[in-house]
Structure formats: structure tokens, C-alpha cells
Amino acid sequence: MSKIKDIEVFFLEYPFPKKLGYKYSGGLVENMIVAIIKITDSNDNYGIGEITHGQFTHEPIIGLTKHFRDMLVGSDTNNINQTWEKMYGSSVFWNREGIGIGVMGGINIALYDLLGKNLKVPVYQLIGGLNKTKIRIYASNGLFDNKDQLIEDAQKAYNLGFRIYKMRVVEPSSIIELVHAFKKEFKSKMDLIVDAVQGSTSNPWATKVSINIAKKLEDYEVLFFEEPCRVENLDGYKEIKNNTNLNIAGAESIPTARAFKPYFENNVFDVVQFDIATSGFTEGRRIADMAYVYNKPLAIHSWGSAISIMAGIHFSLSIPNAAFTEYCFMDHPINQSLFENETINISNGYIEPPKTYGLGIKFDENLTKEFPYKEKINTMILTDKEDIGLK
């Protein structure tokens, strides 16, 4: 049995070319930033995890990683549940939700990756084994305000084997035109998900705006309408859900089963999403089990690199109520350096169980030179909009 020798965090960054022009209802997406957790054991083997919050902040992650490292060095690498409870129990006064949970999630994923490599088994075998032989996976991008870019990106996804595509709302006034163009192009060949991204915007729309969009989207049979209002706005979710027959989905920034509880009790989600690189496998299983009790399907959220993509695949294959897992489809070269086999094979919208030890991820610290991170103020969220939409 090996011991935890070290826990480190590394940041990678790829600035998107200006021509891509990635944008959404809350701002701009100018960089792909990946916060990687590396756990080394006493035998000098390593496991890799990811922290979704690395897209948004830097120094707090460094401090929290050191905090948990100092606590865990010398612990048995096999006792992953014990490690989670030790981190959570010791920080519960200040860490019931938020970035601390995200760092814990990255550590949790890395421990499972390490254990899988040490035992020479895939991660899904460590979290209960296979429940299904394949899982639907969707290409997630659609950060465009014109139909030509949208169709081009979706076509690229289709050619790679995806049969579901997720697009973001840039402006309420243009979304129906873009959805119409997508459906006209792909007809029944590809399903569509629409993400309003209102869960974390600085100036969310009035609830009526989301209701009006939802009513119009009903004609296009989208799979689900994601985060149509601010996450904290439980009454807003109720109002939207009561005024549409669309499936309403949320919410990626809710990190624990306890935090999800009022949303289940108020029946505001038709599709439950949590971010795998925030909740990790241990807390993620609790959320999944609660969703199972309420008969809610899961769409695993993984808005990150190959690390969180692979984590979502392993997790969803082991869960009975998992319906989809996400593949962040933004155009960047970092994933090619992280996938153990450089890419993954998707066939007719599905992916089969990976034949890997651990997650199927490799990591070379020289990647920090190839994709150097420059600390900056995050520009993804704009706070200077002139008004809040009312229609």
C-alpha cells in the first residue's frame, strides 16, 4: 500500500485565436485554462485530476491545494473515501460549497486515477463497475453569434461521430434564428441542447425572458434547456418549469448532494447536472444516488480538458440514471497532449468503456512550458451591460 507523497497543481493556458470569437450570454471566452492536480505516491507513481474553477481563478487554488496537501501527505492512497471525509470534515466551517469543494474534487479524481494505475484497472471498475456498455456523449460548444460558424462547428462534431450538439445563447433575440438554422441543416441527424448560461452571469435576464425563449424552443424539440436562470433563484426555476414542456437542466455550480437537496424537493430540474471536476467521484455518487431516488436522469457536466472528459465517461458508465456526458468541444491543442491515446473514439453518438489503467490520461510537466499560464483578471464574465433584457 502506497502513501501520498505530494500533491501539486499546474496551470495550462491556450489563448484562442481571435477569429474564433467565442462568446456567450455572459461574456467572452478568450482562453482555455486547465488547472491540473498531480498526486505522487511513495512509489513515485502519479494520478491526475482537474479543477474546473481553474477557468476562473488562480491563487486561491494554489493556497487550497497546499492546505489539503499538508493535511494528506502520508495518508494511504487506497483510502479515498476517508480522504474525502478528512478534507470535508476539517473544512466544513468554511467549505460547504464553492472553490474548496472544487479542489477536493480534483484531488479525489487524481486519487482514483492513481489507484487505477496501481491496480491496473480502469476507474469505472473502482466505482462499482460497468452499469452500461456505452454512454451518449455530446459535443459542447456553440459559442457563436452567427449561423455559419455554428453549422461549421457542428458539422465537424458530426464528422467525428457526435450525434448531439450543445450551443450557448449569445443574445435572446438571435437564439431562435440560430436554432432554426441548425435544425434545417441537420434535421434528425443531430439532436440539440441549448444552454442559456444564466446560472453564473453577472446580469441574468428577467425570468420572463427565459420563459419566452423556452416557449419558442418547444417547436424545435431540443433535448433540454440548461440553466435558464441564476442558480440561487429557486422560485425562478419553478416559474420557468411551470410554463414550458421543455426539459429544464441544472446546475453545474452546485457541488454537493446537500446543496442539491432543495432543488430535488422543489422538483425544478428535469435533467440533473453536476460538474465532475468539482464534485469528484465520491460526492458525485451521492448526487447521482439522490437523483436516482427522485427518478431524474443525469447529464454529467465536464466543461474542461481531456481529464474531466475522461472522468465523466468513467463515471457515467457506472451510473444507472446517467443519460449523457459532456465533451468540451472548444478548439484547442491541449487535449492531444493529455489523452493517453491522443483521442477517443465516438461511434454514432456513443462512447464505449475505455480500455485504460486509471482514467486514460498522461501528463508531462513540460506542458507548462508549451502552454504557459499568465495570471490575469478573468474576462469571461462581463459586468458592464447597459441593461437587463425584458423580452
Image (spheres, rainbow, N blue to C red):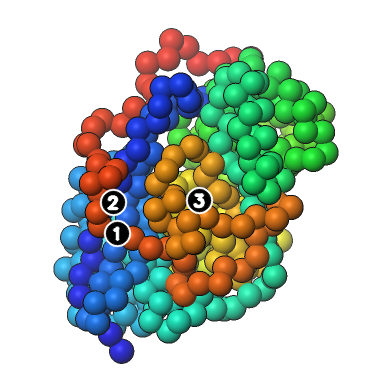
**What residue did someone put label 1 on?**
364
Residue sitting at x 74%, y 23%? 181
Residue sitting at x 74%, y 37%? 222
Element assignment for label 3: loop
Give left or right: position of 118 versus 23.
left
Element assignment for label 1: loop
Give left or right: position of 187 versus 103.
right
Give left or right: position of 13 versus 126.
left
Mark 2, residues whose alpha carbon is within 10 Å: few (<14), some, or many (≥20)? Answer: some
The image quadrant that residue 17 belongs to is top left
Measure the C-alpha gap from mark 3 to mark 2.
Answer: 21 Å
Q: Is residue 211 above or below residue 161?
A: above
Q: Mark 3, mark 2: which one is toward the viewer?
A: 2
Give left or right: position of 98 versus 312.
left
Which residue occupies the foreground of this view, 61 or 36?
Answer: 36
Q: Amino acid at mark 3?
A: Ser
- Marked residue nearer the N-terminal end (3 or 2): 3
Q: Residue 114 has which mark?
A: none
**What residue did someone put label 2 on?**
367
Residue sitting at x 50%, y 51%? 302
Find residue 51 and report its horizontal and vertical position in percent: 36, 53
- Marked residue nearer the N-terminal end (1 or 3): 3
Find residue 383 and report its horizontal and vertical position in percent: 37, 21
Measure the C-alpha gap from mark 1 to mark 2.
Answer: 6 Å
Q: Contact, CB < 8 Å: mark 1 with mark 2?
A: yes
Q: Amino acid at mark 1?
A: Asp
**What residue did someone put label 3 on?**
302
Q: Amino acid at mark 2?
A: Leu
Mark 1, residues whose alpha carbon is within 10 Å: few (<14), some, or many (≥20)? Answer: few
Q: In what quadrant of the picture does the N terminus appear? A: bottom left
